[in-house]
Every structure is written in C-alpha cells, then in structure tokens.
Image (cartoon, rainbow, N blue to C red):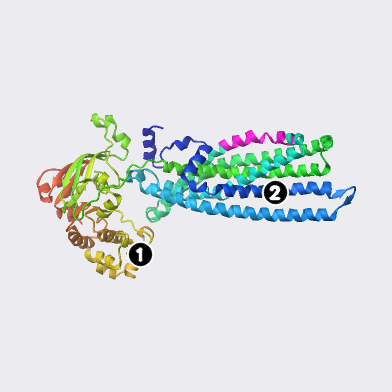
C-alpha cells in the first residue's frame, strides 16, 4: 500500500495503518513475534524436552499391552508376576507423565505471563510515543483491543497451544516410529489412509488465518462501539439517542458474530473429516492386520498393540485440530499487535538531547506548516496550485514570544489555535519549519527537560481514577502534601478544597466524572502549577468554568505568570484583554498579532471576534 493508502486508512479512523505484516503468512508472523518477544525462546529447550519425555511416556502403555499379551500369556497359561510387574510399570509411567505434563504447563504459564507483560509494556510505550495526530486518527477501541483482547488471546496460545503442539507432534512422531518397528508395511497402510488430512489441514489453515484476522478487527469495532456507548451514556439519554446508538452497537455485534461464525466454519468442517478419516484408518488397519498380519510376522500382541497405537495416533491428530483453531486466532491477534509496533513513531525523541535553562522560556516559531495528514500536506499540488484546497491545519506560521510574556491565542473554531499549542508542547512535530523553546530547537531538547519545563493543561482536564491529592501530585515526581497544598494556595483555591467532603482525599472517579467540568479544570491547573514550568500552555483551560471561578483563576494565573511564559488558547476574549500579546489565527494562518487595544483599534478578524463576544456577553 502506498503512503497515500496509509493516510486514507488513518483518516477513516477505524483501522490500524497498513503494515507489511498485513500480507504476511502464519510462519512470518510467528518468526517476527519471537523476535519481538525473545522471552518466549528462553528455556524453550528445557520445556520442549520435558514435554517430549511426557509424550514418550504415552507410548509405554501400548508397548506394555503387547508384552503382556505375548509374554504374560504363554501356552494358555498366564504369568502373574510378569503381568503384575507390567501393570505397576504402567501405573508409574502414567503418574510420571501426569507430573511432567503439569511441570511443563507451569513453566509455560510463567514464561508466557512474564513475556506478555513485557509485550503489553512495550505496546503501551509505543502508543504513548505516537503523536497526537496518530492518536486522533485511530479509534480508541482499536488500540484498547490490541493491548487487552489481542494479547489475552495470545496468552491462551502460549500457555496451552504451544504445549499442545510440542506434545502432539512428539506423540505423532514417536507413535509412527514404534508402529514402523512393529510392521512398516502396516504402518504404510495406516499413513496412506490418513494422508488426505494433510492437504485438508493446509486448506483449512489458510482459510482460518484470514477469517481470524477479520475477526480481530470486528472485536476492535465492538469494543469501540461499546466503549463509546458507555462513556457517552449521559449525552445519549439526554438527547434520546438510544435507538441510533443501539443500532450501531447491534450492527457491530452482528459483524462480530458473522466474523466469528465464518472463522468457526473452518473448524466445524475440519473436525468431522478428521473423525471420519480416523475411523476409516482404524478399520482399514484392523482389517489388513487380521488379513496379512501373520504373513508379515505380527504376533497377536503386536497386532492389538498396533491398533492401540493407531488409536493413540488419532488423539494428537484430533488435538491438533483444536489447537490449530486456537493457533490461528492467536496468530491473527499477534499480527495485529505487531502491526501496531510497526506503526512508525513520527515524534522521535533525541538521544541525550539538550537541557532547557531554568526560568521563563522564550518561544520562536519559524515558518511552520502542519497537517494531520502529512502525506497530503507535502503534496506539490497543494503548495503550488491556489485552486487546490490546502489540507494544512497551520501554514507558514512565524512568531517570536519573549520570555515571561502572557500570550493569548484566539480564533474561530478550527482556525488552528489548539494545534499551534500542541506543537509548542511537542505533542506533534510540524511538517516543515522549526519550533524553538528557550533558543533551542524543540526536536533537540531532551525528553525529561521538555516535560519538566513545558506543561500543558488540555481543554478536557483529564483526571485519573484516584484522589485529588494523587492527581495533583502527578505534576511532579517528588511532590509531597505540602507542595500539593501550596499549588492550591497559589491558585486561591484553598476554600474550594476545604468545602469538599473529604478535601484532597476526595475520589474523582474515572476520568474525573465525580467532579464537574469546571472542578476538573481546577485540579488540572493545580497539577500544572505544582510543576512550576518555564512555559505554561493553557488550551482553553478556563472555558468550562463559571464567571466567578474564572475570576479566581484569572487572579491566580496572574500570580503564576510571574517568572514564566504563559500561552493561553482563549475561548473567552476576557483572557485576551489581560494578555501582553494576542495571536489571531484564521484558517491556519497567523493573521494578526499585538496587544488587545491595538487589535481592537484596527480593522481585522480580532475586532470582529471581540465585537461578537461582547455582544453575546451583553445579551446574557
């Protein structure tokens, strides 16, 4: 697929971008998976040896049956000592095989859990290194499915399927060898009768692998729809949107059901064929053995034992039928996980990197272009042909902001102001141009220094499912209770904290749902204040608070602005009135900059925005 095809997948918002593994077969996925998860290879030799020993133990019982029939009964008389000894040996073998099987399983579970935990961490790390453009392009449920459902499916295979493959193949190999020792001719008869299962298994395997790849996509779709329906329950009920949402969830569930049935269709076809062929093989072997057994040198004990071996041969074949089904769905899930790891990181962190100096930081943006669809943004047609609509979110933005300034960024919805703020926090990199913070290219600043010196309060004020104290303490690694209290004190929010039922120990709930939107923003602002950054970016952080709270925050932000640079994406132009500099964006362009009074005095977008805002305020 071309880069343009990848971009289309990203814009669709419901699929992981193209990966070379999308066209890979099962063996390629398995090899790549073992490279990414080397822990699965550690100790595999010991585990395989134990499993093979356990498998070999299963062959002892048919051999003891043969010895009992041929040597335990001689000339019509039986030898009690020999028969009892053989029975005790069989019991010991069965117990030993059970113990070895349990030991093998425990080893596999331990290796699997450790390795898959590492894989989850690796996947989480990869997802968090992606830019905001990538996260905006793929549905949350898709990424959630990769980290949860797909890896859980892989765990089932590693813990059970891998052992079954080792044991079953060992039993198959050992059984065929022992059968050949008894009678290579009768062995050929049995194998020829069973041979149709080989091409049939290959045909089913290919179909299953494709079917389960589709199933993993449908699982992700179902998780996405269900997650959206649950998280948006209040809005859905308030607007009577239940029928539409229910229809979407039902359609996702139906597609999931259809994909599951298509995948299981192969399994349902394979199992009966295996049973039929196995029965034919057993009947044929018994008939030929009775007919030609004596001529081929088979004793009665060997013939009976041979039939037991054929039955034993059918067990791993049937088990492989089941484990093949498990393997296909697990490899399909593994492929989806590996495809995410193939997703290129578009914000590469520098190795080492430079450190930003302490204190307020100057900002310099030089001819910056940005688009969420970077391939389209780099199109020559978009750059050279004015008739071609530009996909740019930002185009040719250049501005210098002095250290310690209070800057307001304003513009209509979709003008690019929030994207501009995200670039300053390096949540994404520009398509072209340079962003400098503190006279350093932001791409060259070390990760730790950037995160310590630049803090952004997003519009939604995201909170974790913890207490207010814990959420604020996330703002600095060494924060103690005194620092948390000081953060609220600086913002003038001590009274607000005091009136809460449990104060700082108040639980905020998942995503802060137990607090109002405005209260969540207060906690988010306190978290940012605790970090004491040199550059503080507020992405419409005060847009959801009431006028009284806004005034309290305005006073607190005036204090916080001392000694640092503050850039506020302003929803309310009252923020712009207090700013030193106002940046006005329109359709991705920086069209005006200056003080509030200068911009109001001149004809342009800002004066129209201010007039509209003023009119709305006066009519309330």
Disc 1 is placed on an element classified as loop
Disc 2 is placed on an element classified as loop
Q: Is residue 279 above or below residue 149?
A: above
Residue pictured at 38% horizontal, 56% vertical: 234
Q: Quadrant of residue 376?
A: top left
**Percent position of residue 592, x then y:** 15, 43
Q: Is residue 292 left or right of residue 23?
A: right
Q: How many marks?
A: 2
Mark number for residue 490? Answer: none
**Percent position of residue 600, x then y:** 12, 48
Residue pictured at 29% horizontal, 35% vertical: 377
- Membership of 252 in magenta stretch: no
Locate the C terminus by quadrant: bottom left
Reading the image, the residue beneath label 2 is 58
Main SS, magenta residues: helix
Residue 86, visible in the rendered structure: yes
Q: Is residue 292 left or right of residue 496?
A: right
Earlier in the chain: of badge 2 and badge 1, it is 2
- Membership of 204 in magenta stretch: yes
Locate the N terminus by quadrant: top left
Residue 611, visible in the rendered structure: no
**Percent position of residue 383, x then y:** 25, 31
Reading the image, the residue beneath label 1 is 467
Q: Residues within 10 Å of mark 2 (few under 14, many from 20)?
A: many
Span highlighted in magenta in the image: 189-206
Q: Quadrant of residue 348?
A: top left
């Amino acid at each position: 697929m071309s880069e343009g095809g990848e971009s289309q997948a990203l814009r669709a918002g419901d699929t992981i971008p193209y990966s070379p593994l999308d066209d890979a077969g099962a063996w390629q996925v398995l090899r790549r998976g073992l490279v990414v998860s080397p822990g699965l290879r550690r100790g595999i030799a010991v585990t395989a040896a134990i499993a093979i020993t356990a498998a070999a133990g299963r062959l002892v019982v048919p051999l003891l049956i043969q010895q009992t029939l041929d040597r335990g009964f001689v000339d019509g008389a039986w030898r009690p000592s020999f028969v009892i000894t053989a029975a005790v040996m069989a019991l010991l073998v069965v117990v030993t095989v059970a113990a070895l099987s349990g030991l093998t399983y425990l080893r596999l579970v331990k290796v699997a859990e450790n390795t898959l935990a590492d894989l989850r961490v690796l996947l989480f790390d990869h997802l968090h290194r992606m830019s905001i453009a990538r996260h905006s392009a793929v549905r949350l449920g898709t990424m959630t499915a990769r980290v949860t459902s797909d890896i859980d499916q892989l765990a089932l295979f590693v813990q059970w399927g891998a052992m079954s493959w080792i044991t079953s193949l060992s039993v198959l190999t050992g059984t065929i060898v022992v059968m050949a020792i008894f009678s290579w001719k009768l062995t050929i008869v049995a194998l020829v009768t069973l041979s149709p299962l080989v091409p049939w298994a290959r045909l089913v395997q290919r179909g299953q692998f494709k079917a389960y790849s589709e199933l993993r996509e449908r699982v992700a779709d179902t998780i996405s729809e269900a997650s959206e329906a649950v998280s948006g329950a209040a809005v859905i009920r308030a607007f009577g949107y239940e029928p539409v949402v229910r229809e979407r969830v039902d359609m996702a569930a139906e597609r999931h059901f259809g994909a599951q049935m298509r995948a299981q269709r192969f399994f349902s076809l394979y199992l009966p064929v295996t049973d039929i062929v196995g029965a034919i093989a057993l009947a044929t072997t018994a008939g030929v053995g009775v007919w030609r057994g004596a001529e081929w040198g088979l004793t009665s004990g060997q013939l009976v034992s041979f039939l037991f071996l054929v039955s034993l041969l059918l067990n791993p074949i049937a088990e492989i039928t089941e484990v093949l089904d498990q393997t296909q769905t697990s490899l399909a899930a593994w492929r989806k996980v590996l495809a995410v790891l193939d997703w290129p990181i578009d914000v590469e962190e520098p190795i080492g990197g430079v450190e930003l100096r302490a204190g307020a930081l100057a900002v310099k943006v030089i001819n910056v272009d940005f688009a969420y669809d970077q391939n389209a943004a780099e199109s020559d047609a978009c750059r050279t042909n004015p008739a071609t609509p530009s996909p740019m979110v930002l185009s040719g933005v250049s501005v210098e902001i002095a250290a310690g300034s209070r800057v307001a960024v304003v513009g209509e919805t979709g003008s690019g102001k929030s994207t501009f703020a995200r670039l300053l926090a390096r949540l994404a990199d520009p398509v072209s141009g340079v962003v400098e913070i503190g006279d350093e290219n932001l791409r060259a600043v070390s990760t730790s220094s950037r995160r310590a010196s630049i803090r952004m309060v997003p519009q939604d004020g995201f909170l974790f499912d913890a207490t207010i104290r814990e959420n604020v303490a996330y703002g600095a690694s060494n924060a103690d209770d005194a620092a948390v209290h000081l953060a609220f004190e600086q913002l003038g929010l001590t009274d607000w904290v005091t009136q809460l039922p449990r104060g700082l120990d108040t639980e905020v709930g998942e995503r802060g749902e137990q607090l109002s939107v405005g209260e969540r923003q207060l906690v988010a602002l306190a978290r940012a204040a605790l970090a004491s950054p040199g550059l503080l970016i507020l992405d419409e952080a005060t847009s959801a608070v009431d006028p009284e709270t806004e005034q309290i925050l305005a006073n607190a932000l005036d204090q916080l602005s001392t000694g640092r640079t503050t850039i506020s994406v302003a929803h309310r132009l009252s923020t712009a009135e207090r700013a030193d500099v106002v940046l006005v964006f329109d359709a991705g362009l920086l069209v005006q900059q200056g003080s509030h009074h200068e911009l109001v005095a001149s004809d342009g977008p800002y004066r129209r925005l201010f007039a509209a805002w003023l009119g709305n305020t006066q009519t309330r």
